[in-house]
Image (cartoon, coloured by chain):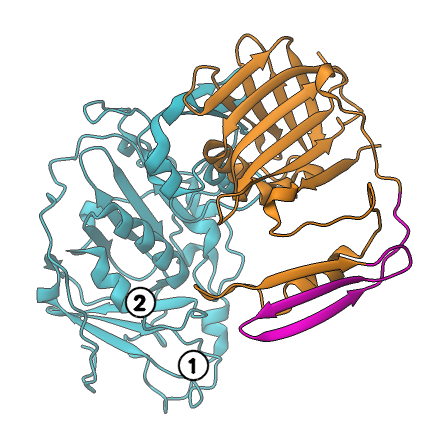
Amino acid sequence: MAIKSVQAVFRSLATLEKTVEKCHIELDEQKNRLTFTLHCKHGLMKTHNLSFQDSESLQAVFDKDSYGNAFRSHPRLLVDTVVHFPPSLDEVTVSVSDDRMWFRNHVEEEADQSKAMLTELCLASDEFDHFAVQVHNSITFCLKELRGLLVFAESTGLPISMYFDEPGSPVVLSVTDSVLEGNFVLATLSDDPNHRKNNTRRARTPPPPPDDFMNDDIDSYLIAMDTSIAPGPSATGPPTPPLADSICSKQAAAANHRTRLHSEEEEEDDETVDSSRPPNKKFCSLFFGSVFPPSSQMTTQPVTSQEVLASDSEDDVE
Amino acid sequence: MSRRVFRGQKKAEIFQEFTIKEDSVGFQVNLTVLLDCLNIFGGSTAPGVSTALRMCYKGYGHPLTLFLEEGGVVTVCKINTQEPEEPVDFDFCSTNVTNKVILQSESLKEAFSELDMTSEVLQITMSPSQPYFRLSTFGNSGNAHYDYPKDSDMMELFRCTKTQTNRYKMSLLKPSTKALALSCKVSVRTDSRGFLSLQYLVRNDDGQICFVEYFCCPDEDVEEE
């Protein structure tokens, strides 16, 4: 289903909050229709019948609990961090040590290193609610997607958790509460031992021979995606919150969506369009559902606002 | 052929001075030019500042003269007049009205702001039975319906005698949303042919009431139910 058509139903948040009393969502499989009925004040009823198409959707295979590095903070912390990067920046590199996390803009190796502007921000572990590092990794992924999902995360007011492993493995960002579990799975650039040694500030080092990087084949990437083959704008960015509550009740439990995650292995076959950067819009997966929080899930805690400190140090990354 | 007619009616009382020497006077001026002249001091006025207007017309062949004054500065505009064209007359008369509702503009404003613009038509259904008063669009992603029940507190008057469904080109109705935005009440009437009359009650700053009326003919391809 095109996201725009659903967004149109919930276009004006201000109006929604003021006038809508109830929202009823019904799926008519025979007519291929999803119906949203908004019961509003003054007896006004808005009915939207949206058409949808069956589509193959690939399931991402990931197990965030098994990832070595896990962090949790209020989304504000990350929002205040990424705001420092130019809006045109495509990818960001996140590196971690035992007590710090760095955000750097990713500069293409082909770019003229002397002309590139490098931006780096450093967050200390105590700015996070949870900061657990097992491996000092550095991952590069799509910043635009991150910005989008942070907007959503912030609007929920929930803490956001981040899990990742080695480069090439997806990074999972997650928001959870009693009625909603959202997992944003982003692909990361795979590790090329020739040049990805966690140091993007090697202005003076000659760039590695392009062949090693350009000829990365599909196997180098573990791509987590949801590629619906329906035409129209691809599924990028989070759906608006009402969609997440497929049953408008805090007590109800829908099918546990996590069971869908441990499925086919065929995802690996999926092509990347551009091998020099992590696939962006196509490879972003969102899972929503009413679930009971799994016991291994970190419990949500009240958070205070965090301050972001931009590092001006010249420390090398370990 | 689909057409619409827009009529703003300003009663004599709205004017501080209104003198006319003949029974009726008709001429035509370019609307854009007229608007530019009326806005000659700039679009929005600061609070406490008002622009005064005096319009004079000497008769056939003479220009329409506007005297505008604001803050002691006077501007004179002379707009050439043209032969008035026969206005389109849809022959919409009150005796032919089959369905009429009067709604508070507030809820209609909301509906119109959300209308699916990918829909070429706006369908209006009026009926003495369910759904009473319904606005429908048929866009790229599906259709949408806005239902106003007859007992809603937004509904000031509900007088429907016959179930009618008519479609009107969205492009023709869109300009009416400006009047809707200014209005506090709107009356929606259809006649036996499916012609639509929208009357907007606008209350200006002085508390004066004036009406803006839109007429629209139905899209030909659809037959009335």
Which chain did the image draw in orange?
Answer: B
Query: Would you say residue B79 sits in the magenta stretch?
Result: yes
In this image, B180 relative to A83: left or right?
Answer: right
- As displayed, is residue B198 above or below residue A220? above
Say which amino acid is labelled 2: Val
Q: Secondary structure at mark 2?
A: helix
Question: Label 2: which residue?
Answer: A82
In this image, A17 relative to B82: left or right?
Answer: left
- As displayed, is residue A34 above or below residue A122? above
Q: What residue do we see at 30% from left, 30% from top?
A: A245
The image quarter containing residue B166 is top right
State whether residue B210 appears in this view: yes
Q: Which residues are magenta?
A: B58-85
- As displayed, is residue B172 above or below residue A82? above
Question: Label 1: which residue?
Answer: A208
Residue B133 location (% of width, % of height): 55, 19
**Crowd rating for badge 2 (residues with CA inside 10 Å; few <14, some 14–19, many 20+):** many
Q: Nearer the viewer, mark 1 or mark 2?
A: 2
Q: Colour of chain A?
A: cyan
